[in-house]
Amino acid sequence: MSLIHEALEKARKSTSNVEAKKVKEKKTQRVRPILFLMVFIILTWAVTMAVLLKTGSDIEKGRFVGKRMTLSTSDASEDSTYNALIVDSLRSNREDVRDTSTWFDSARFFESFNGALSSGNTELLRDLTLNNLNLLSSADFQKVLKIFMTLDDYKVVKEISAKADKSGKLNANLLLELAKYFEMKDQIASAYYYRRSYFAGNADPILLAKAGSLYDKEGLRDSAVKYYRIYLNLADTGELFFNIKRRLDYLANRER
C-alpha cells in the first residue's frame, strides 16, 4: 500500500511539475511579443533622434560656415573701398538707404564711425553722422561737433547741430559750447543756443541776458525785450542787472 502511495505521490508531483512548466511557458510566450515590441520602439526612437540631431548639426554648421564666409568676404575688402561704398550709398536719394541702420548692423556702423573719428576722415564722418542720428548718443555728437568746431567748418557745424538738436541729442553743456562758437559767426543762432542751454539745464540767467543782447544787436526788438524781461525776473541785482534794466526801459519807450 505504501508503495502505491509513493508511486501516486511521484505521479502527482510529476504532473504538477509538467503543468507548472506549461503555465510558465505560456506566460513566457505572452511576454515575449511585448518585449520585442518595446525593443523595436526603443530602437526606432534612438534612430529617429540620431537623424534629427545630425540634421540639426548640419544646419548649424551651414549657418556658421555661411556666416564665416560673409565675414571673410567683408573683411577681405579694402577699408577705402568699404568707406567709399558707404559714402556713395548715403548720398543716394533712395529712401531705403537714407537711414543706413536699415541695411547694415549697428556694430558695423560704429566700426566705421570710430574709424572715421580716429583717422580724421571728415567727409565720411559727416555723412555717417547726418544719416544715423538715432544710433548716436549725446557724447558721440559732442565728439563730432568738437572736431568740426576745431576745424572751424561753420557750415557742417550748423548742419549737424541743427539736426542733432531736433533729435534731442544735445545736452545743456554742448548747447552752451555751440552758443559760444556761433557768437562771432551767426548771432541769431548763438542767441538760440544760449536760451536752449538755459532751458536744458544750465540754470544761469546770464545766458538769457546774452540771448537778449544778441537779438538786440540783430535788431530783433521783440525777442530782445522778451529775454531781457525773463532775465530781470530771475537774476539778482548787480551791475549787469541795472544795465539790462536801462536797456529794456529804452526799448520799451521806443515801443511807445
Image (cartoon, grey):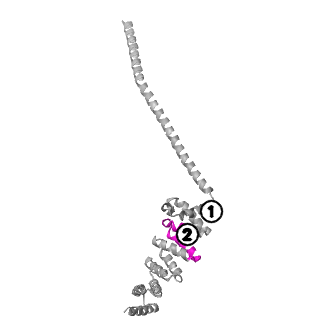
Q: Residues within 10 Å of mark 2 (few under 14, many from 20)?
A: many
**Up-down: is 14 above or below 247?**
above
Amino acid residing under circle 2: Arg
Residue position marked by numbered label 2 in the rendering: 126
Q: Position of residue 31 (x, y in %)?
A: 41, 25
In which quadrant is the N terminus drawn? top left
At horizontal 46% and vertical 80% (from top left) the residue drawn is 192
Q: Residue furthest top?
A: 1
Real-space Cα distance between discs 1 and 2? 16 Å
Q: Where is residue 158 in the image (x, y as percent from the top left)?
A: 52, 75
At horizontal 42% and vertical 25% (from top left) the residue drawn is 33
Q: Kindly check if marks 1 and 2 are in contact, taking CB atoms under 8 A apart as contact.
A: no
Q: Would you say residue 223 sits in the magenta stretch?
A: no
At horizontal 55% and vertical 77% (from top left) the residue drawn is 154
Which range of residues does the magenta coloring cover? 125-153
- Of the residues under marks 1 and 2, which one precedes in the sequence? 1
Q: Would you say residue 146 sits in the magenta stretch?
A: yes
How many numbered callouts?
Answer: 2
Residue position marked by numbered label 1 in the rendering: 80
Q: Is the magenta stretch mostly helix, strand or loop?
A: helix
Amino acid residing under circle 1: Ser
At horizontal 54% and vertical 43% (from top left) the residue drawn is 58
**Up-down: is 79 above or below 254?**
above
Q: Which residue lies furthest to the front in this view?
A: 93
Q: Is mark 1 on a helix, strand or loop?
A: helix
In which quadrant is the C terminus drawn? bottom left
Q: Position of residue 24 (x, y in %)?
A: 41, 21
